[in-house]
Image (cartoon, rainbow, N blue to C red):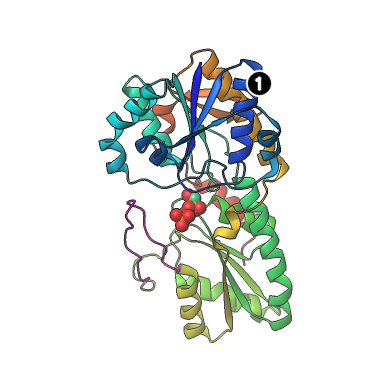
Amino acid sequence: MRIGVLTGGGDCPGLNAVIRAIVRTANGRYGDAVVGFQDGWRGLLEDRKINIHNDDRTDRLLTKGGTMLGTARTNPDVLRAGLGRIKRTLDDNGVEALIPIGGEGTLTAASWLADEGVPVVGVPKTIDNDIDCTDTTFGHDTAVTIATDAIDRLHTTAESHQRVMLVEVMGRHAGWIAMNSGIAAGAHLTLLPEVPFDVDDVCTMIKRRFQRGDSHFICVVAEGAKPVEGSFHLREGGIDEFGHERFTGVAHQLGVEIERRIGKEVRTTVLGHVQRGGTPTSFDRVLATRFGVHAAEAVHHGRFGQMVSLRGTSIDLVPLSEATKQLKLVPENRYEEAAAFFG
Ligand code: F6P
């Protein structure tokens, strides 16, 4: 059998570990050939690929961040229009099954292909942890670990200067990175896309903390956090060529507003792509490896139209159509748990 693999969307620590596990299982255990399409769906649209073997080079991928196949974002309209071309590339290369590894956009395209009869098994990846029907995805733990380490470091410098520190983390629609790193690093407030914030409340909380004699205030801000209407005017970033909301720089804008309203010194740190780079944590290496093994096994047993998923401690298969219906946002009760430590 000839199996195609691609990595789509933003990169994420653990992608190489999945590729390694797929190759080790498909090629090493079953003798199947694995062909890697380059730069996400573009590799299939343009027929650019490499053969990947179960050798020493592949074995050493486990700890390496990024993706050996390259990745890219593709406009969903371009993808829809290109489904015929993608199917032709698969046929021309004798590829009998495809394993797309990606986030919401990549898995949605995988689901379209499955609807058209292409044998597909999806692997979820995202640092944001917003893919539904799986407890978590690899990459998230690494991003939270990096953010936690950064916030730990901000505590000491904030204390020395009695400052307010805002730290912006990734998460356009879902605030999982913000919430988990905020809890882990003992932030005094965390702002998520799911719960619009009121600047007056933020300022009151800061003033109260300093009046109490505390030395600093750390606030984690998800990049998709938004103020409640009428609270303050956030300059929007607009929509990019992939249909995503552009980065608004919410933390910088909020910092200026806090200084203006209460005269406290504020410093803002935007962690950005540091959260996505470098070697995956051991948790992510294990999860990525398990996802890769199970995806290759699913292909071998003809279980198509599915996505591998973590349920408790088991790896299951869920229909791609189910997993791509909606994003997994932070539920209210989880935010309330975190809020017990605010102020
Ligand atoms: O989807 C993962 C993610 O890291 C988001 O958290 C972030 O908003 C986005 O990707 C950044 O995308 P890009 O790498 O295209 O700037």
Left or right, 45 with respect to 120, comes to: left
**Ligand 1 closer than 8 Å to label 1 CB:** no
Q: Name the residue under label 1.
A: 28
Magenta segment: does it hold 239? yes
Name the quadrant containing residue 44. Answer: top left
Q: What segment carries the magenta color?
A: 234-249
Relative horizontal placement of residue 178, taking residue 320 as reference (left or right)? right
Which residue: 57% across, 56% down?
178
**Image height check: is 63 above or below 20?**
below
Towards the viewer: 210 or 70? 70
Please state which of residues 243 and 256 is positioned toward the viewer in this rendering.
Answer: 243
The residue lying furthest to the bottom in this view is: 263
Q: Which residue is drawn at 44% across and 31% down?
A: 323
In which quadrant will I find the C terminus?
bottom right
Residue 311 is at least partly visible in this image: no
Name which residue type carries label 1.
Gly
Q: Residue 78 falls in which quadrant of the image?
A: top left
User: Which secondary structure type mostly characterizes the magenta part of the structure?
Assistant: loop
Q: Give the residue drawn at x 68%, y 53%.
A: 145
- Expressed as whole percent of the image width and height from the top left, the position of residue 229 reads 34, 66
Residue that sits furthest to the top in the current view: 301
Any part of residue 1 in sight:
yes
x, y percent for residue 57: 68, 36
Q: Percent from the top left, x then y, of residue 137?
A: 57, 39
